[in-house]
Image (spheres, rainbow, N blue to C red):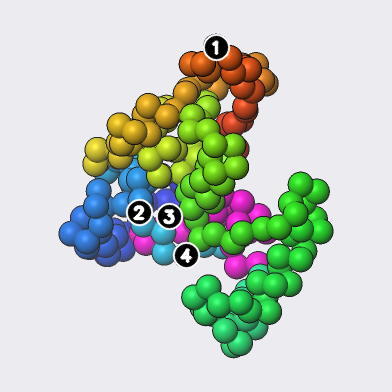
Amino acid sequence: MALAATASPAVQSEQEALYEIAERSLPGAGLGGYSLPTDLRFVVARAEGAGLISAEGRRYIDFVGGAGANILGANHPAVVAAVQAQAAKAIHVFGTLNDAAVRLSEKLVQSIPCAEKVIFTTTGSEATAYALRMARAFTGRDKVLKFEGAYHGNHDYAAFSQFPTAAATIRRPRPTAAACRALCKTPCWSPPTITWRPSSASSPPRRRIWPPSSSSRCSG
């Protein structure tokens, strides 16, 4: 939602220049699979609290909040102070065990009842890929149940049957044929437990559930 008046021509030209660079440098002139139509797109220059300020000076309400990472709002003083303090110590040690990661892992295990141990990942796509890999290894099974319209990342198992399709200027990613064969899908508002019969008559029915994520793109 835009909350500011139309920007001046000079500021608009700056944003148009950024669009031109994005179109030359980024596929679809966007980040990942997220690319707005030309009549809706904008370039974020800074963020304050619950607002995003575009390069042309318009203020937008941030309903995404970094998918939860910015739950305190942008530029919260406590967060800024903590980031500055850590930056003075170390920013990136490329997977090497460090004191901050060890302390955070302990807090997570103590706070999450089902977490015996934790694995840190860079993206949600990486996290769901790890979860699927471990589930396949532990169970010895290959099929995955996915709700129609639920978003669980950009890898082949997850980038399938997402609805509605994002308004992008590039074609959506397609999963491999192998992933399609290993995937079962069901409407997003199905009963809480789904039962299906395996191909072998001697095997018992399998019960698995993968509920839609909080960012599900389901039709009501």
Please name which of the two marks, 1 or 2, marks the residue nearer to the observer.
1
Type of the residue with mark 1: Ala
How many numbered marks appear? 4
Residue beneath the point at 63% across and 17% down: 204
Amino acid type assigned to the residue bearing label 4 in the image: Arg
Query: Decide: marks 1, 2 in contact (CB < 8 A)?
Result: no
Q: Nearer the viewer, mark 4 or mark 2?
A: 2
- Mark closer to the chain start, 3 or 1: 3
Q: Which residue is label 4 attached to?
A: 46
Which badge, 4 or 3, is on the more N-terminal residue? 4
The magenta stretch spans residue 2 = no
The residue identified by callout 1 is 201
- For residue 31, which numbered disc appears in the image? 2
Q: CA distance from mark 1 to mark 2?
A: 47 Å
Instruction: Farthest residue to the bottom: give it.
Output: 88
User: Quarter of the image holding residue 203?
Assistant: top right
- The residue singled out by tag 3 in the image is 58
Q: Nearer the viewer, residue 85 or 89?
A: 89
Does residue 70 show up? no
Tag 3 secondary structure: loop
Q: CA distance from mark 4 to mark 2?
A: 17 Å
In this rendering, the label closer to the viewer, 3 or 1: 1
- Give how far apart the Cα atoms at labels 3 and 1 are: 62 Å
Q: Is residue 13 left or right of 112 when viewed as pictured?
A: left
Instruction: Give, as a single range, the part of the protein colored magenta.
Output: 51-77
Residue pictured at 60% horizontal, 67% vertical: 75
**Quadrant in which the C terminus is drawn:** top right
Q: Position of residue 213 (x, y in %)?
A: 58, 36
Asked if marks 2 and 3 touch (Cβ < 8 Å), the reply is no
Quarter holding residue 155: top left
Residue 159 appears left or right of 196: left
Q: Which secondary structure lies at badge 2?
A: loop
